[in-house]
């Protein structure tokens, strides 16, 4: 009985470790994507600001 409990616990721990690893990888990808989106937003912001400045002169 004790061996079965340890086997079940080991199985659950291994599953949780795999899930944790998977979540860490997904998080790293999301961080990277977020950084790209923030950089893209800054580019758009700069372009919009430049257009607005041109319009002020009209």
Image (spheres, rainbow, N blue to C red):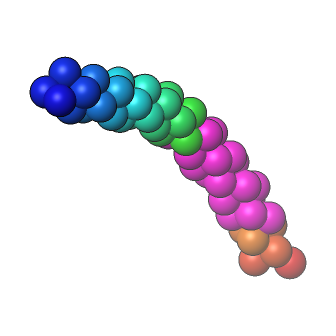
Task: Tell me: 1 left or right of 40.
Answer: left
Q: Looking at the picture, how far across and down is residue 29, in whole percent?
A: 56, 33
Horizontally, residue 51 falls left or right of residue 32, namely right
Residue 2 lies in what quarter of the image?
top left
Task: Residue 39 in the image: state x and y as whole percent.
Answer: 61, 43
Q: Taking the image as drawn, is residue 56 in sight?
A: yes
Location of the N terminus by quadrant is: top left
Q: How many marks?
A: 0
Residue drawn at (53%, 36%) of the image = 26
46 on left or right of 47: left
Taking the magenta stretch, the answer to whether it contains residue 53 is no
Q: Quadrant of the C terminus?
A: bottom right
Q: Nearer the viewer, residue 8 or 30?
A: 8
Q: Main secondary structure of the magenta part?
A: helix
* Residue name at image x 55 percent, y 41 percent: 30
User: Looking at the image, which is closer to me, 3 or 43?
Assistant: 3
Question: In the image shown, does 6 or 19 lie closer to the viewer?
Answer: 6
Instruction: For residue 24, say whether it is visible.
Output: no
Q: Which residue ends up furthest to the front in the rendered image?
A: 1
Q: Is residue 22 above or below residue 55?
A: above
Q: Residue furthest left?
A: 2
Query: Furthest residue to the right?
Result: 58
**x and y percentages locating residue 33 in the rendered image:** 61, 40
Please tell me which residue is depicted at 80% across the width and 64% down the height of the picture.
51
Q: Could you tell me residue 34's position as x and y percent?
A: 56, 45
Q: Residue at x 64, y 47 (%)?
A: 37
The one of 26 and 34 positioned closer to us in this rendering: 26
Rendered position, 51 above or below 14:
below
Along the horizontal axis of the image, is 27 left or right of 36?
Answer: left
The segment highlighted magenta reads 31-51
Answer whether residue 42 is magenta in the image: yes
């Amino acid at each position: 009985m004790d061996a079965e409990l340890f086997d079940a616990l080991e199985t659950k721990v291994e599953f949780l470790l795999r899930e944790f690893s998977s979540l860490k990888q997904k998080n790293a990808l999301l961080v990277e994507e977020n950084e790209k989106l923030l950089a893209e937003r800054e580019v758009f912001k700069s372009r919009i600001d430049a257009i607005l400045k041109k319009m002020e002169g009209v």
